[in-house]
Amino acid sequence: MRIRNNYRHTVAAAGFGYITQAIVNNFAPLLFITFHATYGISLARIGLLVSVNFGTQLLVDLFAAKFVDKIGYRASVIAAHILAALGLVGLGILPDLLPSAYAGLCIAVVAYAVGGGLIETVISPVVEACPFARKSATMSLLHSFYCWGSVLVILVSTLLFWGLGIDVWRIVAFAWAAVPLCNAVYFCFVPIESLTEEGEGMGIGKLLATKIFWVFALLMVCAGAAELAISQWASAFAETGLRVPKAVGDVAGPCLFAVLMGIARLIYVKIGGRVHLQKYIALCALLCVGSYLLAALSPWAPLSLVGCALCGFSVGVMWPGVYSLSSQTCPKGGTAMFALLALAGDCGCTVGPTVVGLVSGALEDNLSWGLLAAVIFPLVMLVGLWMLRRITAPKALYPQDK
């Protein structure tokens, strides 16, 4: 079947979209010490690049709800990939080209962050609109690409730096830019449908006035916070817990977390049509509570790392699962709903690591106490799922992939 009529190509292109987002979020942090040594930028200012990245993505999530439907999914997703590619190329060029290396880094980060934010907003509704029967399983498969993309970026980049020397980082940035550039061309040809007919989608005002939307927003905040609270600290936990060299800890912590998260999403692809999605997410939230407790309270470092890994498995279905639940329950939500839920999820991604850092800092840099405080996120998710069950009709949440 030709590309223009085969929706499997749409899912494949969407998967490469999430790999692009993994590149955007994971490549630059591998170079923070290099930026510090090469350009003489303080670590405090370099750390702000993370805030620039996610802050820009938050703004894109907010405004995308207004303009994506007007310019269309195809134009939006192609522009997103081109911006991501330009940002990655700019990362290797602008710091040396502009009078201020830091300004060059910020411009590059903003460019690829706009692309990453658009990808996050548009890709999920594009796949949700595809005429597949097993929607939640397909969504879980889609989001697993981010996990494998994260592992790929960290491992391949680290191996190249180790084998060829860190001085090749600009060439590596240009090489990674080829992924979104090629995918932009791919998206020119794949079939793309709309979630709702023109004028039928719920507007932002109507969504914000709907009680159940706020429950889904709460679930997305918890999903993002539960995932990032530990993944952003996984390398530090691996380094301090196992007392391995920093380079090994930087790879082992985040990669192990991402691998287990990806495996969880692939498992749901297989069993998605036979389980009750809301109950499955609730079980994952319970496992997440146990994983955080194991990581924070275990007296043995290896068990703490097992807790981190299990946490990756437990959060795997949360984000795509909430997307699927919201689409089933509010089929007229359209692009605005996905954009606002992405905004809520990104807020959680900001809040989770911040809570861990603040609590740890307040208690003599004890990371275990910070992770223990993060248990609040899966616990609140359980409360949100209970609220969802009370609001919605039971039939809306039973096995849907028939």
Image (cartoon, rainbow, N blue to C red):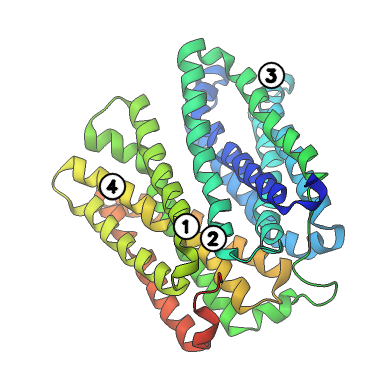
Disc 2 secondary structure class = helix
Badge 4 is on which residue?
Answer: 367
Amino acid on which the number 2 mark rests in the picture = Ala
Q: Of the residues under marks 2 and 4, which one precedes in the sequence?
A: 2
Q: How busy is the neighbourhood of tag 1: few (under 14 within 10 Å), some, or many (20 plus)?
A: few
Label 4 crowd bin: few (<14), some (14–19), many (20+), radius 10 Å = many
The amino acid type, in three-letter code, at marker 4 is: Leu
**Amino acid identity at mark 1:** Lys
Q: Tell me if residue 353 can be seen.
A: no
Q: Which mark is residue 137?
A: 2
Label 4 vs 3, first from the N-terminus: 3
Question: Tags 1 and 2 in contact by the CB under 8 Å rule?
Answer: yes
Residue 144 visible to the viewer: yes
Q: Is residue 197 above or below residue 67?
A: below
**Disc 4 to disc 1: CB gap under 8 Å:** no
In percent of width and height, residue 136 lies at: 56, 64
Outermost residue, left direction? Answer: 299
Q: Is residue 245 left or right of residue 276?
A: left
In the picture as drawn, the residue positioned furthest to the front comes out as 1
